[in-house]
Image: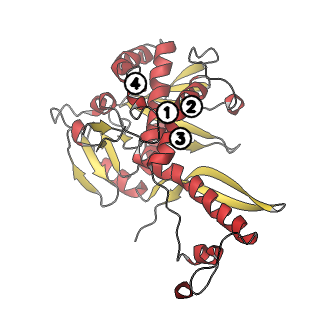
């Protein structure tokens, strides 16, 4: 079986430390363990890109052929201020891939589906279409069993992955036709981190989520999604793309790195080891991205409202 990397190797290689040869620094959020892996030994799952829910099980690999080989060329263009259609496709496509196919994406995507199944169970119970449980389970309704935690809904992660893959062109199109800020970080003592989920979320006052994607230690992009594009046909010419370049100071860099650490699923990677690095990651490690769902009565039914948020990580 192939070892498929859900964070592209070409991305991780930009964070290799000059002091470590072909390795990079890493900190695991769950136990604050520090280690120096090779890029090929992290963010990979055997057959991770294979999805049996799709007619073409490895369709995502075809998509990546237009992304990964051109990543470094796109980086050089961005550093020069020359963002063209190909660079937009590479960066928007990379972000879309991570948010569809990584373990974090599958976990986050399972949340809304789980809530949908639970709501359907409640509605079917109300109509008397589901029999009560046997005496061994107290002859309770499915609604009661779900409420007590005696029955749980489990979503197989490959299903939300399949949904993400089928909509990946739309996601890349929306992000690529939205405004961008190209964040240049010229401070060698405070480089950008990356992670095993390198598409951080940043909440705006209007409730819309920006996406911050570290591209290299000196470069990141803030994607400001235009929600008006959500029902538009995919446009990979990126005719509506607009951007501006921003050179950010150390304080703004720290804000970006805080979001990168908080949104990482478990692994934080960085090129340079500084005195402040360990404490910074340790301070912000107790968070991750999750889907938060509200269930609101609506007529005879229930309306579910789901959004992604940075939440405190639940620990045993």
- Are dots 3 and 4 in contact, CB under 8 Å? no
Q: Residue beneath label 1, please?
A: 96
For disc 2, the neighbor class at 10 Å (few under 14, some 14 to 19, many from 20) is many
Choose mark 3 or mark 1, whichever is in front: 3
Q: Which residue is mark 2?
A: 171
Quarter of the image where one finds residue 271:
top left
* Residue 234 image offset from top left, x and y in percent: 61, 23
Single out the mark in the foreground, 2 or 4.
4
Q: Choose the circle earlier in sequence order: 2 or 3.
A: 3
- 193 vs 22, nearest the viewer: 22
Nearer the observer, 264 or 9: 9
Q: First in sequence: mark 2 or mark 4?
A: 4
**Residues at marks 4 and 1 touching, judged by CB atoms closer than 8 Å:** no
Question: What residue is rendered at 52% in x and 39% in y?
Answer: 164
Tell me where residue 71 appears, x and y as whole percent.
37, 21
Q: Which residue is mark 3?
A: 163
Q: For the residues marked 3 and 4, what is the alpha-carbon distance in whole angstroms?
A: 16 Å
Disc on res. 62? 4
SS state under label 3:
helix
Q: Quadrant of the C terminus?
A: bottom left
The quarter in which the N terminus is drawn is top left
Task: Specify whether residue 16 is in view.
Answer: yes
Crowding at mark 1 (Cα within 10 Å: few <14, some 14-19, many 20+): many
For residue 73, the mark is none
Real-space Cα separation, disc 1 to disc 2, in angstroms: 6 Å
């Amino acid at each position: 079986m192939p070892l498929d990397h859900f964070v592209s190797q070409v991305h991780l290689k930009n964070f290799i430390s000059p002091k470590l040869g072909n390795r990079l620094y890493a900190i695991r959020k769950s136990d604050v363990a520090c280690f120096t892996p090779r890029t090929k030994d992290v963010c990979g799952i055997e057959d991770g890109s294979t999805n049996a829910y799709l007619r073409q099980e490895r369709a995502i690999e075809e998509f990546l052929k237009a992304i990964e080989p051109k990543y470094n060329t796109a980086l050089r263009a961005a550093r020069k201020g020359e963002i063209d259609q190909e660079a937009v496709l590479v960066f928007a496509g990379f972000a879309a891939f991570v948010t569809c196919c990584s373990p974090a994406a599958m976990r986050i995507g399972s949340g809304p589906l789980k809530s949908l199944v639970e709501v359907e169970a409640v509605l079917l119970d109300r109509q008397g279409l589901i029999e009560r449980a046997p005496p061994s389970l107290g002859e309770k309704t499915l609604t009661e069993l779900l409420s007590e935690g005696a029955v749980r809904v489990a979503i197989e992660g490959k299903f939300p992955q399949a949904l993400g893959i089928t909509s990946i062109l739309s996601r890349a199109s929306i992000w690529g036709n939205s405004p961008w800020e190209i964040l240049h970080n010229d401070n060698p003592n405070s480089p950008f981190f990356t992670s095993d989920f390198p598409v951080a979320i940043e909440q705006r006052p209007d409730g819309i989520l920006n996406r911050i994607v570290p591209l290299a230690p000196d470069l990141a992009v803030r994607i400001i999604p235009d929600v008006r594009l959500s029902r538009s046909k995919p446009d990979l010419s990126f005719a509506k793309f607009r951007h501006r370049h921003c050179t950010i100071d150390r304080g703004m860099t720290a804000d970006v790195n805080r979001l990168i650490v908080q949104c990482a699923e478990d692994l934080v990677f960085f090129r340079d080891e500084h005195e402040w690095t360990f404490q910074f990651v340790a301070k912000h490690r107790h968070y991750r991205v999750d889907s938060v769902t509200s269930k609101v009565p609506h007529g005879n039914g229930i309306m579910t409202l789901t959004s992604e948020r940075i939440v405190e990580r639940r620990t045993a």
